[in-house]
Amino acid sequence: MSTFCSAFALLLRAYPYCYNIRPLSHINRSFLSSFGRIRRGTGRCYQGWRGSSAVSRCQVQYRSASSSAMQTRFLDSLEEEYEHLKEKVYRDTHDDDSSSGQENMRLKRLQLALPKLRSRRQLLLEIAELNIMVKDALGDAGIISMAQDDIRKNEEKIEQLDEQILHILTVEESSDVTDLLLEVSAGVGGQEAMLFASELFNMYQKYAAFRGWAFNPLTIDNSDLGGIRSAEAEVSGPGTFRSLTFEGGIHRVQRTPKTEKAGRIHTSTASVVILPKPSDVEVVLRKKDLRIETCRSTGKGGQNVNKLESAVRVVHIPTNTAVECQEERDQVQNRARAMNRLAAILYQRQLDQQTENQSSTRKLQAKQSARSDKIRTYNFAQDRITDHRINQNFHSVEDVLKGGEHLDIIIKQILVMHQRESFDDIVQSSVLKITAKRSDKTKR
């Protein structure tokens, strides 16, 4: 939990620059130092991706007066941005103009984060008051002990809030996907690979039951010896895609097959593909993205053609897509028809893009079912599972294949590492934006 403390402090500093909406210029370099002192501590460590050095557990020592003042200033700025966005989205709705998806997502995240940030601010104020109490205690051991105990409890609550807020600010849009398609296919290894694919498919089915998700098998291609060549299932429930998305890839098994008389260890593979379930494509035509032109129709129509500008041409500016309609004698009807045609064209394009993205994702996750290209190895002889993305070993292979809490531990470890990577990307991006803005100001 507390491994996020240092990262969160940096995020609060960079956060206003991450979304290009309303940069908060008054958050400066001194904010980090006044927000809290970061010091290395002892405790459990977690290893980073691909064998990176271990990250030590950190602790935050909060300064009372300056921290509370800067924290209040920062929170006020976030609340101001929230009110600005809320007003803009409300105005766009009443003006029949849709806000961008980025603005809506930003508003949604601020709605989730602000209550926790306010609670955090209140805890910091309480810590400041407790520090004053300790200072005014005049050596009273009872009062000092009670105050220090309350400070410690508040700091633990702040660490919990830190993790929750960090999750809100770094969580991906894909986490909102509640339905996914799971595909498991046998790779290299013949019948042994098919048996392993069957075990993986059953593992995910049991894990879905463990998490309270719905698991609906769609197709299963069984082999002669009890394995499967391939299988597909639909998994539904809160957090399914976020939890299982990193299961996609090549899984390798090392064990002695039941049919092996010489007792030799064989290596086989199976591929797992995780895809978000295709959603209903929504086409939003915003006024500011459209250019509507009228002209006189051509062809049949008598005097109506010569007198009235009933033909309509609608141009979708972002995609430079134009649709013309002059079938009807009335301009309003032609405009409605043109809008419907434009929406249908954009719908088909989005549908094609969604299909193409899914095809690319499937190829990427299932590419080369080779023994050397793997994300995880299940070694039965040593009763060890190695996740190669985090260079971490887990034991009790049979328990993991049961799909319960042992598999849940692995999945959560990977999610923690991915969240940290996502945060690093945000910080690096924000640093580049800050540097660019300072460079522009210098040139001016």
Image (spheres, rainbow, N blue to C red):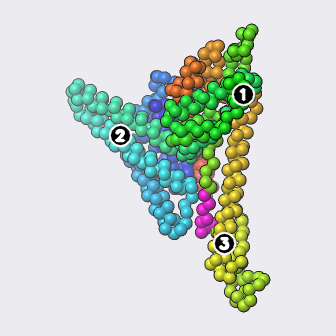
Decide: is 222 above or below 436: above
Q: CA distance from mark 1 to mark 2?
A: 62 Å
Q: Which residue is mark 1?
A: 223
* Residue 288 is covered by the magenta coloring: yes
Q: Quarter-wise, where is residue 218 in the image? A: top right
Of 190 and 321, nearer the camera is 190
Instruction: Name the residue at 65% across, 75% down.
Output: 335
Q: Is residue 107 visible?
A: yes
Question: Taking 211 as reference, is 385 left or right?
Answer: right
> For the magenta stretch, what is the residue range?
282-289
Instruction: Name the residue at 63% across, 28% down.
Output: 200
* Residue that sits furthest to the front in the current view: 224
Instruction: Residue type at mark 2: give it.
Output: Leu
Q: CA distance from mark 2 to mark 3?
A: 59 Å
Instruction: Name the residue at 67% across, 28% down.
Output: 197
Number of the label disc, if any, that sits on residue 337: 3
Badge 2 density bin: few <14, some 14–19, many ≥20, Cα 10 Å: many
Q: Which residue is mark 2?
A: 124
Badge 1 density bin: few <14, some 14–19, many ≥20, Cα 10 Å: some
Name the magenta segment's main secondary structure.
loop
Instruction: Residue type at mark 1: give it.
Output: Ser
Quadrant showing the C terminus: bottom right
Number of the label disc, if any, that sits on residue 200: none
Q: CA distance from mark 1 to mark 3?
A: 53 Å
Decide: is 94 above or below 101: below
* Residue 388 is covered by the magenta coloring: no
Ranked by sequence position, the earlier of labels 1 and 3 is 1
Ranked by sequence position, the earlier of labels 2 and 3 is 2
Q: Position of residue 21 (x, y in %)?
A: 54, 55
Q: Position of residue 365 (x, y in %)?
A: 69, 36
